[in-house]
């Protein structure tokens, strides 16, 4: 009988391989197409956990502090992320307001909290049912979180508004930029293969 728990399927071509641990810093590749099967990144889970905690702090700052200030004819106006969404909603731009809230608040917060629960479940060997559902949803929702696009939108708006009023960059703008970098770093460091393997540890079929 084949022990599927010790097999790895290539994400690109589906070729099955027997799992063999690789040395730290090394990568296992597919025999058929050459795609990366899994990597052994030393302290990967700890690094992603640190980035997730940093991301949560930056997320709170991004939403708590003013994002932008506008000064024109001695009148100064500050904008918060949520305040801007409410203003769009009140102005009749319901879809735009909903998209801003989803992409800058709901999806990033879900991703950060889900990742935190997944990493803590692995670290402290908690019962993995919730972490498994959260990690699957995290992977499904990933393409919908467009923080980078929103950041680009802010920069374009700043260039346009620069001619009409004096712009004051709020602390939240820097926190937001930090959040984009932190979440991108966490995503690129994270090895889903290792996460699934750790979460499924207790469910593996005994090999002997
Ligand atoms: Zn392959």
Image (spheres, rainbow, N blue to C red):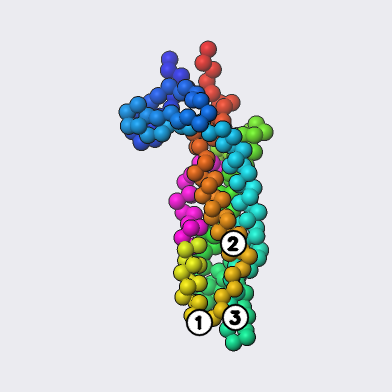
Main SS, magenta residues: helix
Task: Answer whether residue 147 is visible to the viewer in this image.
Answer: yes
x then y, percent, for residue 77: 62, 78
The disc placed on residue 164 is 1
- Magenta highlight range: 134-150
Counting other residues with Cα less than 10 Å from the Cα at mark 2, is it few (<14), some (14-19), or many (20 or more)?
A: some
Residue at 50 percent across and 37 percent down: it is 192
Q: Secondary structure at mark 3?
A: strand
Quadrant position of residue 87: bottom right
Image spot of residue 88 (x, y percent): 53, 73
Spatial separation of the CA atoms under disc 2 and disc 3: 19 Å
35 sits left or right of 195 in the view: left
Q: Earlier in the sequence, mark 2 or mark 1?
A: 1
Residue 60 highlighted magenta (yes or no): no
Distance from the alpha carbon under mark 2 to that under mark 1: 22 Å
110 or 56, nearer to the observer: 56
**What is the secondary structure assignment of the residue under circle 2?**
helix
Q: Which of disc 1 and disc 3 is earlier in sequence?
A: 3
Q: Is mark 3 within 8 Å of ligand 1?
A: no
The residue that mark 2 highlights is 174
Residue 5 appears in view: no
Q: Which residue is mark 3?
A: 71
């Amino acid at each position: 009988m084949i022990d599927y728990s010790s097999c790895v399927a290539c994400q690109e071509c589906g070729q099955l391989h027997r799992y063999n641990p690789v040395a730290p810093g090394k990568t296992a590749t597919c025999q058929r197409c050459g795609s990366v099967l899994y990597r052994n990144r030393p302290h990967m889970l700890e690094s992603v956990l640190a980035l997730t905690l940093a991301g949560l702090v930056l997320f709170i700052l991004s939403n708590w502090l003013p994002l932008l200030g506008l000064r024109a004819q001695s009148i100064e106006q500050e904008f918060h992320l949520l305040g801007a969404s409410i203003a769009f909603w009140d102005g009749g731009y319901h879809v735009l307001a909903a998209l801003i809230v989803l992409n800058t608040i709901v999806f990033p917060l879900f991703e950060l909290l889900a990742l935190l629960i997944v990493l803590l479940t692995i670290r402290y060997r908690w019962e993995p049912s919730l972490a498994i559902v959260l990690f699957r949803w995290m992977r499904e929702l990933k393409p919908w979180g467009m923080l980078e696009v929103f950041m680009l939108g802010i920069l374009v708006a700043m260039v346009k508004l620069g001619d009409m009023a004096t712009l004051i960059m709020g602390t939240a703008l820097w926190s937001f930029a930090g959040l984009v970098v932190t979440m991108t770093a966490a995503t690129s460091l994270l090895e889903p293969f290792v996460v699934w393997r750790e979460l499924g540890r207790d469910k593996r079929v005994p090999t002997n």
